[in-house]
């Protein structure tokens, strides 16, 4: 079955040009809305034509992720239909690239992977770069870590700090990387480690770091100034909240100690499992940060 419609001709694209394609799917690997914020940022600078459209009805579970619709007095309007599309975009120096964005498919991952391969081969895409983010037990006051992955070792641009092995829930992006490798197509990706207590908010720093990784892998150039300003504003907002709520600041300080101890053990080639001392449980941290999150969501104070 053909799950994607590709345009016959692409305007303003020279024949024979090889393109990178960025992948920004939301729904699973999107803690802090990292890839969504990154995609929106790219769209604010360049909104190119749609060159491929996926049959979203095949992939989307409407009952699990219900689109929004506006009810006005006595009727519905403005249905926010999910879209999974590929656009032809331009970077800050007018280099072309493709951007595949929309909800991660809920079903038919194999069909999705095959449809993406159709796009890759139709536009002679030389590299697919996925962006994602996961919640991690890391404080916002420490450098935001990025993990890179790729279906060929030669595509790795950085050394990941953790070299172990772990079984994790699969994603459409992960399957796509495997399937593209089987057909000789290159794919890499970057995953931002967002502080778990900020995972449900837009976290611009994650988007900034993801796009910096994309720049490394593709040679594209983006104007990231607006994301940097937004990241500084978010950091300032969190700092102000912690100053006004010392009991929450104490929990963050405990997380910082835990993070620093882990970093030291990694540098020394040791394991934290051999150390004595109690670490706060997930429930304890979660209970404290319910208050933290409620504070960030609350109304602005009035004078």
Image: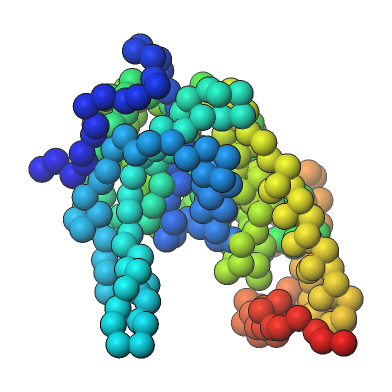
Q: Which quarter of the figure has residue 49?
A: top left
- Write the residue at 52% across / 44% down: 43
Residue 36 in the figure: left or right of residue 301: left
The percent coordinates of residue 16 (x first, y second) are 35, 11
User: What is the x, y in percent for residue 125?
Assistant: 37, 24
Q: Position of residue 109 (x, y in %)?
A: 26, 50
- 167 on left or right of 116: right
In the foreground, 261 or 107: 107
User: In the picture provided, is 129 more to the left or to the right than 32?
Assistant: left
Relative depth, front residue between 154 and 4: 4
Q: Residue furthest top?
A: 16
Vertical order, 281 against 106 (above or below): below
Residue 167 placement (x, y as % from top left): 44, 54
Q: Residue at x 33, y 59 (%)?
A: 82
Vertical comparison of 290 with 9: above or below: below
Which colour scheme appears in the figure?
Answer: rainbow
Q: Does residue 120 sit above or below 87 in this rendering?
A: above
Report if residue 276 is visible in the image. no
């Amino acid at each position: 079955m053909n799950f994607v419609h590709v345009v016959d001709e692409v305007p303003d694209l020279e024949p024979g040009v090889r393109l990178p394609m960025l992948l920004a799917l939301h729904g699973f690997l999107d803690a802090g809305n990292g890839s969504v914020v990154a995609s929106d940022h790219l769209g604010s600078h360049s909104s190119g034509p749609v060159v491929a459209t996926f049959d979203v009805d095949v992939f989307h579970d409407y009952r699990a992720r219900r689109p929004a619709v506006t009810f006005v007095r006595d009727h519905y309007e403005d249905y926010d239909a999910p879209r999974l599309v590929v656009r032809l975009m331009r970077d800050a120096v007018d280099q072309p690239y493709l951007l595949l964005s929309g909800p991660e498919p809920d079903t038919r991952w194999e069909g999705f992977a095959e449809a993406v391969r159709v796009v890759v081969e139709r536009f002679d895409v030389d590299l697919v770069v996925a962006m994602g983010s996961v919640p991690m037990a890391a404080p916002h006051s420490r450098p935001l870590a990025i993990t890179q992955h790729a279906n060929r070792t030669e595509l790795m641009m950085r050394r990941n700090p953790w070299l172990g092995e772990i079984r994790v829930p699969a994603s459409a992006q992960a399957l796509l990387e495997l399937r593209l490798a089987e057909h000789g197509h290159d794919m890499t990706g970057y995953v931002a480690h967002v502080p778990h207590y900020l995972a449900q908010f837009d976290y611009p720093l994650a988007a900034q770091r993801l796009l910096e990784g994309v720049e490394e892998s593709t040679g594209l150039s983006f104007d990231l100034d607006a994301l940097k300003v937004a990241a500084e504003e978010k950091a300032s907002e969190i700092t102000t909240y912690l100053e006004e709520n010392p009991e929450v600041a104490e929990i963050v300080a405990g997380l910082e100690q835990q993070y620093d101890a882990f970093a030291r053990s990694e540098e020394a080639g040791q394991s934290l499992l051999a150390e004595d001392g109690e670490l706060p449980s997930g429930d304890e941290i979660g209970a404290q940060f319910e208050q933290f999150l409620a504070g960030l969501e609350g109304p602005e104070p009035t004078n």
